[in-house]
Image (cartoon, helix red, strand yellow):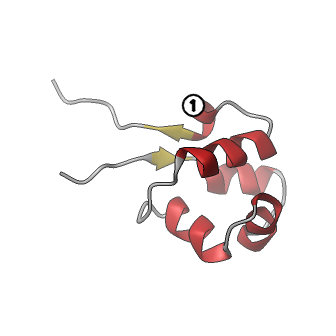
Amino acid sequence: MALLLHNRIRVYRAEHRLSQSDLAAAIGVSRKTISTIEVGRFVPSTVIALKIAQYFDAAVEDIFSLPKKAH
């Protein structure tokens, strides 16, 4: 079963007028890493998720969320 993880990185980047490259450099990863996380092809490690949240001074849960369970 594939793990889906929704994220709002693109929204946060837009609000802060940052490119993927800017964010990547700020947290020490590649631009491709940011890109693949944004489009949902890669689930970030806890450390990367925390670094992104810390950079934006936001809670991890504000940026990342699991899809709602179907009942």
**Quadrant location of the C terminus in the rendered image:** top left
Q: How many marks?
A: 1
* Picture residue at 73% right of the left edge, 33% below the top: 58
32 to 50, vertically: above or below: below
* Picture residue at 84% right of the left edge, 52% below the top: 16
Residue 29 rendering spot, x and y as whole percentages: 68, 67
* Picture residue at 32% right of the left edge, 31% below the top: 68
* Front-lying residue, 46 or 70: 46
Q: Quadrant of residue 62?
A: top right
* Front-lying residue, 70 or 26: 26
What residue does disc 1 label?
Answer: 61
Residue 33 rendering spot, x and y as whole percentages: 58, 69
How crowded pointer 1 is (Cα within 10 Å; few <14, some 14-19, many 20+) is rated as few
Residue 38 rendering spot, x and y as whole percentages: 54, 60
- Which residue is situated farthest in the top direction here? 71
* Picture residue at 65% right of the left edge, 41% below the top: 50
Residue 13 rendering spot, x and y as whole percentages: 74, 56
33 to 15, vertically: above or below: below
52 to 14, vertically: above or below: above
Q: Secondary structure at mark 1?
A: helix
Q: Is residue 45 left or right of residue 4?
A: right
Kind of residue indicated by mark 1: Glu
